[in-house]
Amino acid sequence: MADKWSQTALLVIDMQNDFILEDGLMKVNGGKAIVPNVIKAVDIARQRGILVVWVVREHDQQGRDVELFRRHLYSPGKAGPTSKGSVGAELVDGLVIKEGDYKLVKTRFSAFFATHLHSFLRTEGIKSLPVILAIIHVGVQTPNCIRQTVFDAVALDYQPVTVIVDATAAATPDIHAGMCIR
Protein backbone atom coordinates (compact mmCIF):
# COMPACT_ATOMS: atom_id res chain seq x y z
CA MET A 1 0.00 0.00 0.00
CA ALA A 2 2.92 2.38 0.66
CA ASP A 3 3.66 2.58 -3.10
CA LYS A 4 0.15 3.87 -3.72
CA TRP A 5 0.93 6.88 -1.52
CA SER A 6 4.62 7.36 -2.37
CA GLN A 7 3.91 10.46 -4.47
CA THR A 8 1.79 12.14 -1.80
CA ALA A 9 2.77 14.49 1.02
CA LEU A 10 0.76 15.77 3.97
CA LEU A 11 1.57 19.40 4.77
CA VAL A 12 0.81 20.29 8.39
CA ILE A 13 0.76 24.07 8.47
CA ASP A 14 1.32 26.39 11.46
CA MET A 15 0.08 24.06 14.20
CA GLN A 16 2.10 26.02 16.74
CA ASN A 17 1.29 27.30 20.22
CA ASP A 18 1.03 30.95 19.16
CA PHE A 19 -1.75 30.01 16.70
CA ILE A 20 -3.55 27.35 18.73
CA LEU A 21 -3.42 28.07 22.48
CA GLU A 22 -5.87 30.41 24.23
CA ASP A 23 -3.02 32.76 25.17
CA GLY A 24 -1.29 32.46 21.79
CA LEU A 25 -0.06 35.73 20.34
CA MET A 26 -1.79 34.98 16.99
CA LYS A 27 -4.61 32.73 18.26
CA VAL A 28 -6.89 31.32 15.57
CA ASN A 29 -10.36 30.68 16.97
CA GLY A 30 -11.21 27.08 16.23
CA GLY A 31 -7.57 26.07 16.06
CA LYS A 32 -7.64 24.07 19.27
CA ALA A 33 -10.75 22.18 18.12
CA ILE A 34 -8.99 20.77 15.05
CA VAL A 35 -5.97 19.37 16.91
CA PRO A 36 -7.49 15.86 17.29
CA ASN A 37 -8.30 15.76 13.56
CA VAL A 38 -4.79 16.90 12.66
CA ILE A 39 -3.35 14.17 14.91
CA LYS A 40 -5.59 11.63 13.17
CA ALA A 41 -4.58 12.85 9.70
CA VAL A 42 -0.89 12.62 10.62
CA ASP A 43 -1.37 9.11 12.05
CA ILE A 44 -3.18 7.91 8.92
CA ALA A 45 -0.55 9.51 6.67
CA ARG A 46 2.24 7.73 8.52
CA GLN A 47 0.37 4.40 8.37
CA ARG A 48 0.05 4.78 4.60
CA GLY A 49 3.66 5.80 4.09
CA ILE A 50 2.76 9.37 3.16
CA LEU A 51 5.54 11.91 3.72
CA VAL A 52 4.60 14.30 6.56
CA VAL A 53 5.95 17.83 6.14
CA TRP A 54 5.69 20.10 9.17
CA VAL A 55 5.47 23.68 7.91
CA VAL A 56 6.16 26.15 10.72
CA ARG A 57 6.62 29.87 11.03
CA GLU A 58 9.76 30.95 12.82
CA HIS A 59 10.81 34.56 12.91
CA ASP A 60 13.84 36.49 13.99
CA GLN A 61 13.47 37.74 17.61
CA GLN A 62 13.42 41.33 16.31
CA GLY A 63 10.93 40.60 13.53
CA ARG A 64 13.31 41.58 10.74
CA ASP A 65 11.97 38.77 8.51
CA VAL A 66 8.27 39.26 9.21
CA GLU A 67 5.74 40.93 6.91
CA LEU A 68 5.71 44.72 7.20
CA PHE A 69 2.13 44.75 8.50
CA ARG A 70 3.21 42.60 11.50
CA ARG A 71 6.46 44.32 12.46
CA HIS A 72 4.71 46.31 15.22
CA LEU A 73 4.29 43.01 17.14
CA TYR A 74 8.06 42.70 17.66
CA SER A 75 10.19 44.85 19.94
CA PRO A 76 13.59 44.57 21.65
CA GLY A 77 13.46 42.29 24.69
CA LYS A 78 10.01 40.90 23.85
CA ALA A 79 9.52 37.83 21.68
CA GLY A 80 6.95 38.41 18.96
CA PRO A 81 4.69 35.72 17.49
CA THR A 82 6.50 32.47 16.60
CA SER A 83 9.91 33.93 17.37
CA LYS A 84 12.62 31.31 16.90
CA GLY A 85 13.23 29.44 20.16
CA SER A 86 10.07 30.71 21.87
CA VAL A 87 7.37 28.51 23.38
CA GLY A 88 4.95 30.07 20.90
CA ALA A 89 6.94 28.67 17.98
CA GLU A 90 6.74 25.09 19.29
CA LEU A 91 4.22 22.59 17.93
CA VAL A 92 1.07 22.32 20.02
CA ASP A 93 0.94 19.39 22.48
CA GLY A 94 0.05 16.11 20.79
CA LEU A 95 1.87 16.88 17.55
CA VAL A 96 5.36 15.47 17.23
CA ILE A 97 7.89 15.47 14.42
CA LYS A 98 9.10 11.89 14.05
CA GLU A 99 11.93 10.24 12.18
CA GLY A 100 11.15 10.31 8.47
CA ASP A 101 9.07 13.50 8.77
CA TYR A 102 10.41 16.79 7.43
CA LYS A 103 10.33 20.26 9.01
CA LEU A 104 10.16 23.34 6.79
CA VAL A 105 10.49 26.85 8.19
CA LYS A 106 8.67 29.68 6.43
CA THR A 107 8.29 33.40 7.08
CA ARG A 108 5.30 34.17 4.86
CA PHE A 109 1.79 32.79 4.26
CA SER A 110 2.70 30.30 1.52
CA ALA A 111 4.89 27.32 2.35
CA PHE A 112 6.32 27.67 -1.17
CA PHE A 113 7.25 31.37 -1.07
CA ALA A 114 11.00 31.93 -0.55
CA THR A 115 11.52 28.33 0.69
CA HIS A 116 12.91 25.18 -0.87
CA LEU A 117 9.63 23.22 -0.49
CA HIS A 118 9.02 22.73 -4.21
CA SER A 119 12.51 21.35 -4.91
CA PHE A 120 12.35 19.16 -1.79
CA LEU A 121 8.97 17.66 -2.79
CA ARG A 122 10.15 17.02 -6.36
CA THR A 123 13.33 15.34 -5.05
CA GLU A 124 11.12 13.12 -2.89
CA GLY A 125 9.00 12.23 -5.95
CA ILE A 126 5.89 14.05 -4.70
CA LYS A 127 3.42 14.97 -7.40
CA SER A 128 0.32 15.64 -5.36
CA LEU A 129 -0.78 17.11 -2.07
CA PRO A 130 -3.76 14.69 -1.02
CA VAL A 131 -6.14 12.39 -1.69
CA ILE A 132 -4.93 10.03 -4.34
CA LEU A 133 -1.38 10.98 -5.31
CA ALA A 134 -1.54 14.55 -4.10
CA ILE A 135 -0.55 17.06 -1.43
CA ILE A 136 -2.91 17.17 1.52
CA HIS A 137 -3.16 20.22 3.73
CA VAL A 138 -4.15 20.52 7.37
CA GLY A 139 -3.60 23.35 9.85
CA VAL A 140 -4.38 27.05 10.32
CA GLN A 141 -5.39 29.55 9.04
CA THR A 142 -7.62 28.78 6.06
CA PRO A 143 -7.79 32.20 4.32
CA ASN A 144 -4.09 32.92 4.75
CA CYS A 145 -1.47 30.18 4.94
CA ILE A 146 -3.64 27.29 3.79
CA ARG A 147 -5.11 29.17 0.82
CA GLN A 148 -1.80 30.68 -0.31
CA THR A 149 -0.03 27.32 -0.11
CA VAL A 150 -2.86 25.62 -2.03
CA PHE A 151 -2.80 28.31 -4.75
CA ASP A 152 0.96 27.94 -5.14
CA ALA A 153 0.73 24.13 -5.20
CA VAL A 154 -1.83 24.33 -8.00
CA ALA A 155 0.33 26.86 -9.90
CA LEU A 156 3.26 24.44 -9.58
CA ASP A 157 1.15 21.63 -11.12
CA TYR A 158 0.69 19.37 -8.09
CA GLN A 159 -2.38 17.20 -8.70
CA PRO A 160 -4.57 16.75 -6.85
CA VAL A 161 -4.27 19.27 -4.06
CA THR A 162 -6.63 18.49 -1.21
CA VAL A 163 -7.59 20.34 1.97
CA ILE A 164 -8.97 18.30 4.86
CA VAL A 165 -11.73 20.70 5.87
CA ASP A 166 -12.26 19.36 9.40
CA ALA A 167 -8.52 19.58 10.10
CA THR A 168 -8.20 23.25 9.12
CA ALA A 169 -9.51 26.38 10.84
CA ALA A 170 -9.94 30.13 10.48
CA ALA A 171 -10.79 33.05 12.76
CA THR A 172 -14.50 32.24 12.48
CA PRO A 173 -16.53 29.31 11.12
CA ASP A 174 -18.01 31.60 8.44
CA ILE A 175 -14.57 32.63 7.18
CA HIS A 176 -13.47 28.99 7.14
CA ALA A 177 -16.62 27.88 5.29
CA GLY A 178 -16.19 30.69 2.76
CA MET A 179 -12.74 29.36 1.85
CA CYS A 180 -13.89 25.80 1.24
CA ILE A 181 -14.69 24.86 -2.33
CA ARG A 182 -16.45 21.57 -2.81
Image: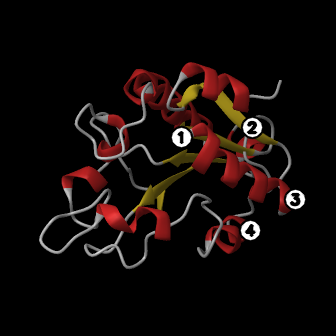
Q: Which mark is residue 122?
A: 4
Precedes in sequence: disc 1 or disc 3: 1
The amino acid type of the residue labelled 1 equals Gln
Which residue is pictured at 58% across the width and 37% down the height?
Answer: 45
Question: In the visual, does 25 lie left or right of 152?
Answer: left
Q: Secondary structure at mark 2?
A: strand
Q: Secondary structure at mark 3?
A: loop
Precedes in sequence: disc 4 or disc 2: 4
Can residue 128 be seen?
yes
Precedes in sequence: disc 3 or disc 4: 4
The residue where tag 1 is placed is: 141
The amino acid type of the residue labelled 4 equals Arg
Q: Hey, which residue is sitting farthest left in the picture?
A: 77
Q: Secondary structure at mark 4?
A: helix
The residues bearing labels 3 and 4 have C-alpha atoms spaced at a distance of 11 Å
Q: Nearer the viewer, residue 100 or 55?
A: 55
Q: Is residue 40 above or below residue 143?
A: above
The residues bearing labels 1 and 4 have C-alpha atoms spaced at a distance of 25 Å
Question: In the visual, does 169 lie left or right of 62?
Answer: right
The residues bearing labels 2 and 3 have C-alpha atoms spaced at a distance of 13 Å
Q: Are marks 1 and 3 in contact (CB under 8 Å)?
A: no
> In x, y percent, where is residue 166?
59, 22
> In x, y percent, where is residue 148?
68, 53
The amino acid type of the residue labelled 3 equals Asp
Q: Hey, which residue is sitting farthest bottom in the picture?
A: 64
Precedes in sequence: disc 2 or disc 1: 1
The residue where tag 2 is placed is: 162
The amino acid type of the residue labelled 2 equals Thr
Which residue is pictured at 44% across the width and 57% down the height?
Answer: 56
